[in-house]
Image (tube, grey):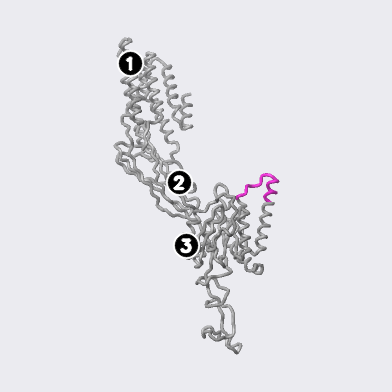
Amino acid sequence: MTGSVSPRLRGLIGLAGAGLIGALATGRPELAVLAAPFVLLAGVGLTLAEDPRLTAVVAVDHARVLEGEHLRATVALHNQGARAVQAELTLATSAHLGRVASGAIAVHLASGERLTLGFELRAERWGAHTVGPLSVRARDRFGVSVSSERLDQRLAVRAFPREQPLRELVAPRHTQPFLGTHVARQPGDGIEFADLRPFATGDRARQINWRASARRGATYVSERHPEHSSDVILMLDTFAEARDLAAGTLDSAVRAAASLARAHLARRDRVGVVDFGGGLRWLEPGFGTTQLYQIIDALLASDIIFSYAWRDVQSIPRRVLPPRALVIAITPLLDERAIGLLLDLRTRGCDLTVIEVSPLRYAPPAARPADALARRLWQLQREVLRGRLEALGIAVARWDEDDSLAPALEGVNSFRRSARHVLPV
Amino acid sequence: MSVLLVALAVAIGSAAPIPWSLALLAVVFLLHGHDSLVLAPIYGAGLLLVGEVAQASIDLRGVGCLTPGWIASRLAAILALSALGAGAGAVVAAAATIGAARSVALTAAGAIAAVMAVGTIALLARRGHR
């Protein structure tokens, strides 16, 4: 620990010295009598002072939490010195990992004493957070010497985004030839009834629909739709966001992406992520729980990176956007480059759906009539943009985080059922 | 004025005004009257107590949680020092009442003793700083 005398000692010495000198100069012994306790304090304190030998080890009870959950960081202290110390401990944490009770913790440690202290923390937002460093400031019993040390031990805490349970998902237009839960359009082996057709050579007997055959006087077989999986690409727009001090559209977008990824992976879809913004990051589509954690880890690193660079769909590697994949873009529709990318994807025949994370709640309230008018114009511009996207067959779901994501997805499916005819060939 | 200085020290979280406040209180005491040598040890201990309590409240600024042991040990140290300070003051007061005639040699010895006391404390502080 880095030790030094307390700044107040200078004042004490000055006071004591002034008293003693004043007593001699004025011939009034009362001044020396008044100065005596201060001389004693400084003398005793400095004689007994020694560098404190404190060791501290920081630990957290959970390295992975859901955002909004509490965790506990513990500091194990050991006073290895020969004298008692008074210590103040301040535990630093990253911005969105808040302390439940603010301020330092002051403790008294006798010689050889061990003490474990707890700091209640709360993951206020998803992300990769750190706990530490720990600053320890130790004083001797009389407060005349102060030592401080910064323990550069940093512990990683990952706060996973809060997810919404989703029963209905965006139904993909195309499926992949893997077993899944989506009813494929083409006939094959499955459960869902598709059609009846006359028996043909090679058809199996178990396919014969005996009731239809008896009614029509000829042998008919039932065609069925197989259950296949699909490729789903979650595209996160990180060009721009609207935010206030507490939250922003990116926070909501990551929560939506995590919810969708979990729900699609649970239905045996292959899910990939593209973080498209100032930086470009991606995760190739994959199955299973491992992929889910990889996706969440990738989402936790999402951030708005300011950039003037104009990116288009050519920037995305081909293997990240498999043909016939369902692309779900989660965007606040604030940046022209993101909108351009959506239009580009659609004109290339991509099966695209947009979940618009509403930025309206982050817009400041209109204080003047002109502000109200500007806000209204902005909303109208957004309506026009939505109409433009929908005219191209892109389903746009408006979603505010206060609402559930499920109704927005229902709206998307409803639109996609009725908008098939506008799909470009 | 003195109370205001202590309040200012606590409010701004700086110990700098405390010695000035104590000095003012000492001046008030000296201006008070003729029985000052009898009361000085207790008054001096009281000044130390005031200074230490003010310092403790400054030290606690920014502290969100306090263990009971901290308060007990600090309080014990403050009270013990004040008691010892009163004793030390009493010894000095007793020495002052011996009634030796004022002389240049005695004044020089006193000055040397004062300088040595302050010098010793400064040396100790310097050693601690290193």
Q: Chain of mark 1?
A: B
Q: Tell me if residue B8 can be seen.
A: yes
Most extreme residue toward the bottom is A217
Q: Chain of mark 3?
A: A
A355 drawn magenta: no
Nearest the viewer among A178 and A117 is: A178
The quarter of the image holding the C terminus of chain A is bottom right
Counting from the top left corner in percent of width and height, residue A345 is at: 61, 62
- Looking at numbered disc 2 in the image, what kind of residue is underneath it? Thr
Q: Residue at x 30, y 38 (%)?
A: A81
Where residue A50 appears, as percent x and y from the top left, is 32, 34
Secondary structure, mark 3, is helix
User: Foreground: B15 or A197?
Assistant: A197
User: Percent from the top left, x then y, of residue A93?
Assistant: 45, 46
Task: Say what amino acid the circle numbered 3 marks.
Answer: Gln
User: Which residue was labeled with disc 3?
Assistant: A291
Does the segment drawn in magenta span residue A365?
yes
**Real-space Cα separation, disc 2 to disc 3, in angstroms:** 29 Å
Q: Which one is in front in this view, the residue at disc 1 or the one at disc 2?
A: 2
Residue type at tag 1:
Gly
- Count of numbered badges drawn on the protein: 3
Q: CA distance from mark 1 to mark 2?
A: 56 Å
Q: Residues within 10 Å of mark 1 (few under 14, many from 20)?
A: some
Residue range corresponding to the magenta coloring: A362-376
Task: Tell me, for residue A93, which label it has, or none.
Answer: 2
